[in-house]
Amino acid sequence: MNRIAIAALAGAAFLAPALASRAQTNYAAVQIKPTDLGRHTWMLEGNGGNITVVEGADAVIMVDTQFAPLHDKIKAAIAELAHKPIRYVVDTHLHGDHTGGNQAFWMDGATLVGQDLLKKSMAEGTTNALSGAKTPPAPAAALPTVTYAERTTLAVKGRRVELIHVPRAHTRGDTIVWIPDADVLATGDIVSVGGRYPNIDVGDGGGIEGMIAGVDACLKHIDAKTKVVPGHGPLMDREAVKTYRQVLVDARDAVKALKAQGMSEDQVVAAKPLAAIQTRVGATDQASVNFARLIYKSL
């Protein structure tokens, strides 16, 4: 079955969430902002997760796709920078703000790549650990057609990137992407900053201990000169990642200490264990409640 036929069969499943998302966000007003990372490598910011673009002599490797309605803008931005076709799209994790454009880029001819468990979660659908809300299975045309277990390498002419699985972190199927010749690391939502706590998808097997281990895996790849593309927020360096790690450790320790006393989840939340940390990250009261619950559930 060709790509057009598969996409047509998947259309109904794909269209409903796209329309709902479009009703909440004015995608026409979104601007795609590129940041030059050197060595024909860029970070793109728009609406949703950050995108990383790696240009080879013959083709492009793209990391994450943001939301489906932004496909045309993202594609145009990449074409202006790279002037090459997109051969590979790498999914760092399963959430729609990073994978929403998968089907459209696959229709353009890109090969979708992700970790084995990411594909499984997307194909089966997931459940939010806080709200119980169900995310339905993704259409077949949005699923990775190339998967890997622990590590793999993708290459276009003159460029290569390394894909590394980080288990049970933001989700169960996270990938960090190392671009050695540009000294760039794309972390997906294992690292996510900017007036917010990271999300931990406990319903998909994510956990606070895995998040910290995931940040440690990132730190092993980078030095003071490395450019770090987080899942959300501005470009980072090693010191910023270390500061972010400390937030995770302090949040874990604060919740863990109360849970060890025998407190229930509601009792821990009522004790406001993240009050001081909330000030450091600039998050809201509700975000602190949610993050405390996610940490508690994952410990």
Image (spheres, rainbow, N blue to C red):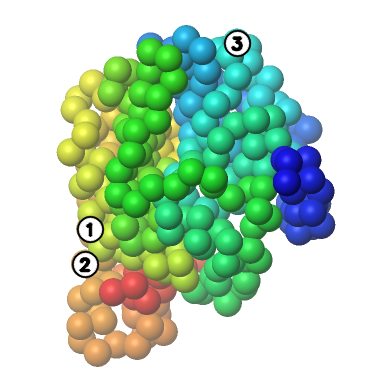
156 vs 173: above or below = above
* Residue 214 locus on image (x, y percent): 27, 51
User: Which is closer to the viewer, label 3 or label 2?
Assistant: 3
Compute the Cα span from label 1 to label 2.
6 Å
Q: Which residue is mark 1?
A: 249
Q: Residue at x 55, y 53 (%)?
A: 95
* Residue 172 locus on image (x, y percent): 39, 61
Residue 109 falls in image quadrant: top right
Compute the Cα span from label 3 to label 1.
43 Å
Circle 3: element type: loop
Circle 1: element type: helix
**Viewer-proximal residue among 119 and 215:** 119
* Residue 165 locus on image (x, y percent): 33, 49
Q: Amino acid at mark 1?
A: Val
Q: Residue at x 38, y 13 (%)?
A: 158
Q: Residue at x 28, y 60 (%)?
A: 210
Q: Amino acid at mark 2?
A: Asp
Q: Which mark is residue 220?
A: none
| Marks 1 & 2, CB-CB < 8 Å contact | yes
Mark closer to the chain start, 3 or 1: 3
**Viewer-proximal residue among 256 and 200:** 200
Q: Which residue is mark 2?
A: 253
Asked if residue 113 shows in the view, the reply is: yes
- The 10 Å Cα crowd at callout 3, few under 14, some 14 to 19, many 20 or more, is some
Q: Amino acid at mark 3?
A: His
* Residue 3 locus on image (x, y percent): 72, 40
Asked if residue 272 shows in the view, the reply is: no
152 vs 212: above or below = above
Q: Residue at x 22, y 31 (%)?
A: 222
Q: Which residue is mark 3?
A: 83
Compute the Cα span from label 3 to label 2.
48 Å
